[in-house]
Image (cartoon, rainbow, N blue to C red):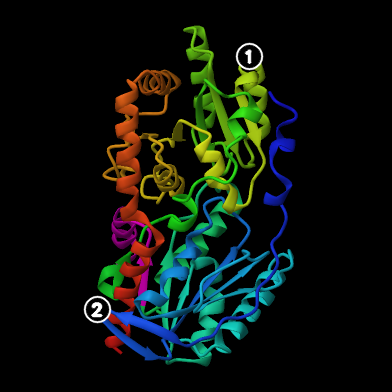
Amino acid sequence: MHPDTPALVDKEYLQPPPTRPERSQSAEFRIGPVQMRSPAPRVVFLRGVDFSNSIGASDWRIAFHMLEFGFSTTVLGRGPLPTVWPEGVELVSVPARRLPVLGTLVLSYRYALETLRRSPDVIIVNPAVALAGALCKAANSRARLVLDIRTIPVEVQGCTGRLLRIYFNAVLRSSLFEACSVISEGMLDALDSQFDLKARMPTAVWGSGFDEALLVSAPKDRSIRQRLGLDGKFVLIFHGSLSPTRGLAEVVHSLRLLRDRDEGDLHLLLIGHGDAESRLKNLAMELNVEDQIWWIPPVMHEAIPDWIAAADLGLDPLPDHPWWRHQGPLKVYEYLAMGKPVLATDLPCHRNISEAVILVPDNRPSTLAEAILRIKHLPTQDKQRLSAVARQDAQQHTWRAKAQELARFLHDLMGSA
């Protein structure tokens, strides 16, 4: 284990960026090949997201590209705002207090007020802020209300888990929404079989993506490998929630198996926090691989490319569980965008993305160890080809591409009014 790891994260990545004034609500926009100059219809993404959370919560950045396809946008969330964002996009951070029930009610009321002040044409809400969406619809029946589902309730157990599932089911059964968008075809089919979504309302799929301007640009910090002493090593990376059901314990065990085969020059970057962190650290010590694992605290989203650039192979070793089968693993697209092959389990959410996503039948330590070893010892020419394929295939999954899909759906929805 490396106790000095947190000091290796540049302080500038952890500083909250300054806020930014509101943007204009009118701009030039395009519908197909035709350019028009007029106030663009306003879509409000009522996400409730923490703008500073880089772990699987950057899907709100799709808003940065909606203007090109005919919509000016507002995103309502919490926490520090990014330092820059495009014209025609408005980001609003709404103060939130951590109070049981009452805090949720107050925040929903504030979200509704901020939304209604902008006289939106379309309001896109996720299930967590459905109450705010209901308030908006009651006050402005003209606005089209779209339910957007990025995930089902995951990693929840006991009474809390049952309550979350009851709430989630109630939202999906509600007649409040006029349309529904979902993160993947598989999740849409699974939800449709339970809630009959396709018969009740128009549906669309827009999956996870990545910020092209951020991920494709050259890393700012090229010294991470040198600072960590990883020059000449084979480096694995996982960034996200370090929770018990993500297959990370199996990765740690695979390091031990590989060390027993004299493959001790493998190192693992784990970026994030989570409930399994202390257990993973104890496991690494028990298996005597603590010197091969670097525990990196969460970093700002803008720093993620630097850390991915320092690695050779991205990991997403999810077990075969209903929670994960139809998710949209954002980290996979970010790895690919940086030209890194990805080792992932053979789940629907990982299939048909890219040849550079190398699938294994399960996440047993022996399975992962064999695959890691095989990728590590590929000829240089094959590694370069995989890197080129990764970058090329990632281009289908930019936020701009996802914005085009969503905008087409919203234009059809508004046209049907």
The residue drawn where x is 32% and y is 69% is 404
- Answer few, some or many: residues within 10 Å of disc 1's Cα (few below 14, many 20 plus, some between 14 and 19): some
Q: x%, y% of residue 293?
A: 61, 25
Q: Which span is picked out in magenta?
A: 179-196
Element at badge 1?
A: loop
Q: Quadrant of the C terminus?
A: bottom left
Q: Is residue 134 magenta?
A: no
Determine whether label 2 and label 1 are within 8 Å by CB: no
Q: x%, y% of residue 105?
A: 66, 75
The residue drawn where x is 58% and y is 89% is 117
Q: In the rendering, which numbered label is found on residue 288? A: 1
Per the picture, the main secondary structure of the magenta-coloured stretch is: helix
Q: Amino acid at mark 2?
A: Pro
Q: Could you tell me if residue 172 is visible in this image?
A: yes
Circle 2 sits on which residue?
33
Q: Nearer the viewer, residue 159 or 338?
A: 338
Q: x%, y% of residue 215?
A: 47, 50
Tell me which corner region of the image, top left, top right, bottom left or bottom right, holds residue 37: bottom left
Q: Nearer the viewer, residue 370 or 249?
A: 370
* Alpha carbons under labels 2 and 1: distance apart: 60 Å
Q: Could you tell me if residue 280 is visible in this image?
A: no
